């Protein structure tokens, strides 16, 4: 999009505690229009060896622990 949206507040200031929010109930996969995660991987034609290492790696593994 060729524009930027500007907001009055930072995103983290607009969050509510989970206890104040209504839980979302998602329907179970019906096998016709929606599928479970495993079947979605199968139909996406993803094919790799089980012991294949992850292709996304962190340059510095300490960053997520230190930052979060």
Image (spheres, rainbow, N blue to C red):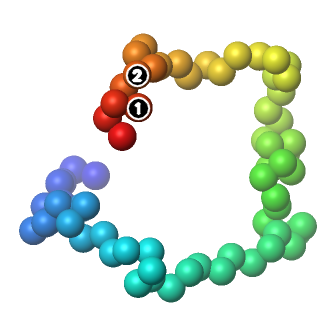
Query: Which residue is painted at 44% across and 74% down in the image?
Result: 18
Query: Which residue is painted at 79% across and 66% down in the image?
Result: 34
Q: Quadrant of the C terminus?
A: top left
Mark 1 vs 2: CB contact within 8 A: yes
- Establish if 45 lies above or below 50: below
* Element at label 1: helix
The image quarter in which residue 12 lies: bottom left
* Element at label 2: helix
Image-based side of 3 in relation to 31, left or right = left
Query: Which residue is painted at 70% across and 16% down in the image?
Result: 53
The image quarter in which residue 30 lies: bottom right
Of residue 50 and residue 48, the one placed in the foreground of this image is 50
Of residue 63 and residue 10, the one placed in the foreground of this image is 63
Residue found at the far front of this picture: 66
Task: List x then y, in percent, for residue 47.
Answer: 83, 27
Mark 1, residue position: 65
Q: Which mark is residue 62?
A: 2
Residue found at the far left of this picture: 8
Image-based side of 60 in relation to 57, left or right = left
Query: Which residue is painted at 17% across and 60% down in the image?
Result: 10
> How far is the residue under mark 1 from the one under mark 2?
5 Å
- Establish if 65 lies above or below 54: below
């Amino acid at each position: 999009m060729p524009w930027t949206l500007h907001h009055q507040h930072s995103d983290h200031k607009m969050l509510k505690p989970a206890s104040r929010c209504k839980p979302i109930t998602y329907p179970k996969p019906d096998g016709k229009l929606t599928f479970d995660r495993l079947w979605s991987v199968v139909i996406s034609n993803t094919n790799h060896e089980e012991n294949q290492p992850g292709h996304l790696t962190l340059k510095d593994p300490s960053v997520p622990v230190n930052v979060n």
